[in-house]
Amino acid sequence: MLLEVENLSVWYDKAMLINHLSMGVDTGELVSLVGPNGAGKSTLLRAITGLVSWEREITRRSAHGDIILEGKVTFDRERIDQIPAHEIAKRGLIHCPERRRPFREMTVLDNLMAGAYLLKDRNEIRNNLSKVYQLFPILKDRSNQISGTLSGGEQQMLAIGRALMSKPKLLCIDEPSTGLAPLLRAEVFQKIRGVHQLGITVLLVEQEVGIVFQMATRNYVLSSGRIIAQGPGDQLLQDEVLRKTYLGL
Ligand SMILES: Nc1ncnc2c1ncn2[C@@H]1O[C@H](COP(=O)(O)OP(=O)(O)O)[C@@H](O)[C@H]1O
Ligand SMILES: [Mg+2]
């Protein structure tokens, strides 16, 4: 497994947001994580990519409520649950957070270059940029435009493009279609397929179960901080209770 989460639990004060959860993603997969609002999907991604630990350090220093993270996260055969978020990013585990907006006052190109800040090799950066432009021609057309003037859909494309600039081994994308009009949603999903076809392993959090189950090699259904079901989409869709109670279908 490229990513392996073992027996992970996260508490914010007395609220247990992730409850002894185990899951994994293998190299080359597109794995989805679905489930109702408040299930803990974003918390899980934040725990994997080091943001929960970062938040814990801050709250400790300001003597706010306690955040506890327990369990084991392994990435590329290395344990990462004890190391800082930027070190995790360096290892190729990149997070594209929920409602992430690019730096609004910077141009599209500057935003993309900011995504490559971990790389030193200019050829590699140029190579990545041409791949991003191939996947998102609109970003090439708009490369000198100020990012804040892009449409919502274009900003989401830019957020994904920026994450791609570091050539991640695993890209975690949190609800990229939320807040977009249906046509744009379809386009975002098509782009995520494109990202996967570039050979990048993807962990995708989404509400749009219908589309996501068609794209993903495997799916996890999360509810109240636990994995309550997993498997290929067609198999999960056969379960009436799952459909009605957890997938909103
Ligand atoms: N920083 C936080 N402090 C306390 N509770 C939080 C925090 N972030 C999220 N929660 C709570 O944790 C639960 C899971 O949230 P979240 O991971 O955002 O779910 P999802 O992404 O599946 O909608 C929710 O009940 C939410 O209110
Ligand atoms: Mg969320």
Image: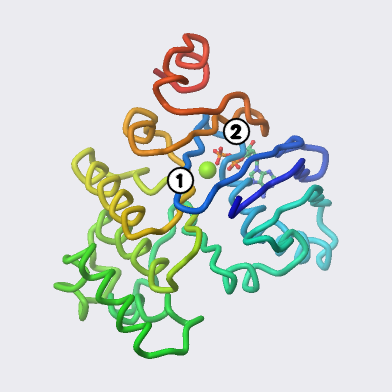
Q: Position of residue 76 (x, y in %)?
A: 62, 61
At which x and y percent is residue 162?
Answer: 38, 69
Q: Is residue 183 left or right of residue 61?
A: left
Q: Position of residue 88 (x, y in %)?
A: 63, 67
Side of 47 relative to 109 (left or right):
right
The residue at which mark 2 appears reads as 39
Out of 161 and 16, give the one closest to the viewer. Answer: 161
* Relative height, residue 137 to residue 65 (above, below): below
Q: Quadrant of residue 189?
A: top left
Is 87 rendered above or below residue 229? below
The x, y position of residue 93, in whole percent, is 55, 63
- Residue 22 tag number: none
Image quarter of the C terminus: top left
Q: Report helix, strand or loop for mark 1.
A: strand
Label 2 residue SS: loop
Residue drawn at (14%, 72%) of the image? 141
Q: How many marks?
A: 2
* In front of the other: 9 or 147: 9
How many C-alpha atoms fall within 10 Å of the one at disc 1: few (<14), some, or many (≥20)? many
Residue 17 location, quadrant? top right
Measure the alpha-carbon separation of dots 1 and 2.
Answer: 15 Å
Residue beneath the point at 46% across and 23% down = 247
| Residue at horizontal 37 percent and vertical 35 percent from the top | 212
- Check disc 2 and give the amino acid type: Ala
Which residue is depicted at the point 64% across and 54% down?
Answer: 48
The mark lying in front, picked from 1 and 2, is: 1
| Image: 166 above or below 176 | below
Q: Amino acid at mark 1?
A: Leu
Q: Is mark 2 within 8 Å of ligand 1?
A: yes
- Residue on which disc 1 sits: 204
* Most foreground residue, 136 or 142: 136
Question: Label 2 crowding class (10 Å Cα cut-off): few <14, some 14-19, many 20+?
Answer: many
